[in-house]
Image (cartoon, rainbow, N blue to C red):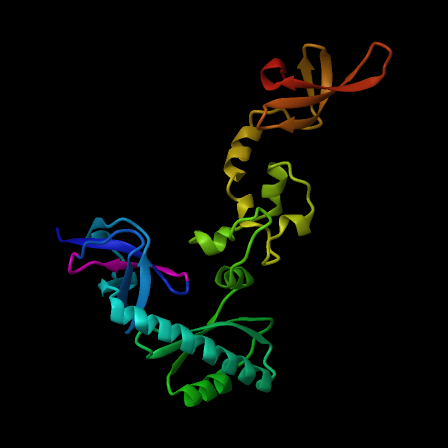
Amino acid sequence: MHQRHIVNVKLSDSKEVLAENIEKIDLKIGDKVVVFIENTYDVGVVSSEEKIVEESKIDKKNLYKLIRKVNQQDIQRIKENLQKSQEVLKTIKQVVKNYDLPIKVVQALYSFDRTKLYVYYTQEKPVNLKKLIHELAHKFKIRIEMKQIGVRDETKILGGIGVCGYELCCKRWIKKFESISVEMAKVQQLTLNIPKLSGLCNRLKCCLFYEYQFYKEAVEKFPKIGGKIKTPDGEGKVIGIDCIKELVTVELKTEDGETYTKNFNLSQVGI
């Protein structure tokens, strides 16, 4: 069975693809490489250890060719491409403004070989971009590829600092956006203050996903809030739980009928 040497490569737009190391170049995570993708040459960073995969288990439609490691000449070209991309971005934004289009252009990127210009944008409503593409292609004498992205992708591209004080996770390491719901916040016993639970993209923070599974499994060990349980001090009603400290907050009554609350270790109570 034929085997192929495969690595993950993170492209300049943060998209991650599979690339075949045909020449069996000595690679390590972090190496910058040139890849041939969608009939053009582009640059990316190796983001995984090389793995040997049986040919029958590979989706060849989504497998690209790794050409070489980036050399000094390539580095100079990358710098020139970045500068040119920043320059054309200003022009593109002005053209969009002239057409009064309901889109926001976030980024413009030249492919490594400058045969394509990728334009990343968000839109508020459906819009016909044929005239825009035609004018941009005529102005820059290059093939234009418009790529619509979401607000989370926009934040991933632009980057920023989270309330934690660190660079945004989406910019630094997140490869795939997970579906985030208010239910995740509820399971983690967080106050449902949507502005505080939202990130710079104005969507629920990705970090709500990190510990969700832990809390989901932990909560199953606890009695339901509002339910009756037995404690060393008698029967009471559960009014709160702490999954980390494994505590159950219970509302109890004295012999005089007055209510008070007390924390018990999970092992001390029974449903």
Task: Identify the residue at image location x=50%, y=87%.
Answer: 131
- The residue lying furthest to the left in this view is 1
Count how many numbered circles sit on residues in the image: 0
**Quadrant for the C terminus in the image:** top right
Residue 110 lies, with reference to residue 57, above or below; the image says below
Decide which of 61, 241 is in the foreground and name it: 241
Indicate whether 92 appears above or below 200. below
Q: Examine the rendering and report whether any part of residue 55 can be seen.
A: no
Residue 176 point in image, percent of width and height? 44, 53
| Left or right of 208, for residue 229 | right
Q: Is residue 87 magenta?
A: no
On screen, residue 24 above or below 185? below
35 lies left or right of 271:
left
- Name the one closer to the observer, 268 or 111: 111
What residue lies at 33% left-to-right and 62% top-to-bottom?
44
The x, y position of residue 56, in whole percent, is: 20, 53
- Nearer to us in this view, 41 or 243: 41
Tell me what residue is drawn at x 68 percent, y 10 percent. Answer: 232
- On the question of residue 46 being in view, the answer is yes
Q: Give the range drawn in magenta.
A: 14-24
| Spot occupied by residue 268 in the image (x, y as percentages of width and height) | 62, 14
